Image: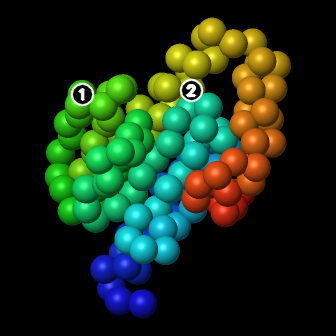
Amino acid sequence: MNKKYQNIAAIKDNVILRLKNAGFHILYYASITTNSHYIKIDYGLCNSLRIADHKGKKKLAYRYNLRVDLRGFHIDNSKKWEQYIYGIDQIDQLIIDIKKRRITKRMYLTPYEYRDKMQHLKNRMGKEKGFWKNCIVV
């Protein structure tokens, strides 16, 4: 494995560890064709994160994007929902924003509803078409 791929893998491991330590449930998938890593946060209830060193496919729209080849932060409004693009220097802000997203979601759901929705999403994994079918629970 070359250094570039090791670096992205280390960043992915760090982000997953920080999310797990914050109490999130994580589904993970590594692309077999690109140097991209995909994470569903709370099984997708708190959206998904793509970690990569390049732009993603135009047809895909992950809420959170960590681009290790960029610096800074910007919002892309060209898709059906806002995409947040964080540069490598914005990992702390990324984690903060994901935590805020969970707080916002929990404002509208009871703890039981939140848990039930997560369980429903978890149960769907492996039954749908697409690469998430091959994801792993971390």
Which residue is nearer to you in this view: 109 or 132? 132
How far separated are the C-alphas under marks 1 and 2?
21 Å
Q: Residue furthest front?
A: 129
Q: Residue at x 63, y 17 (%)?
A: 106
Q: Residue at x 18, y 56 (%)?
A: 70
Q: Are marks 1 and 2 in contact (CB under 8 Å)?
A: no
Q: Position of residue 96 (x, y in %)?
A: 43, 35
**Residue 107 placement: quadrant:** top right
Q: Residue at x 29, y 47 (%)?
A: 58
Q: Is residue 5 left or right of residue 31?
A: left
Q: Position of residue 110 (x, y in %)?
A: 75, 12
What amino acid does circle 2 point to?
Arg
**Residue 34 placement: quadrant:** bottom left
Task: Give SS at disc 1.
Answer: loop
Quadrant location, the C terminus? bottom right
Q: Residue furthest top?
A: 108
Q: Is residue 133 left or right of residue 81?
A: right
Q: Is residue 44 left or right of residue 31?
A: right
User: Is 86 rendered above or below residue 1?
Assistant: above
Q: Position of residue 104 (x, y in %)?
A: 53, 17
Q: Which comes sooner in the sequence, label 1 or label 2? A: 1
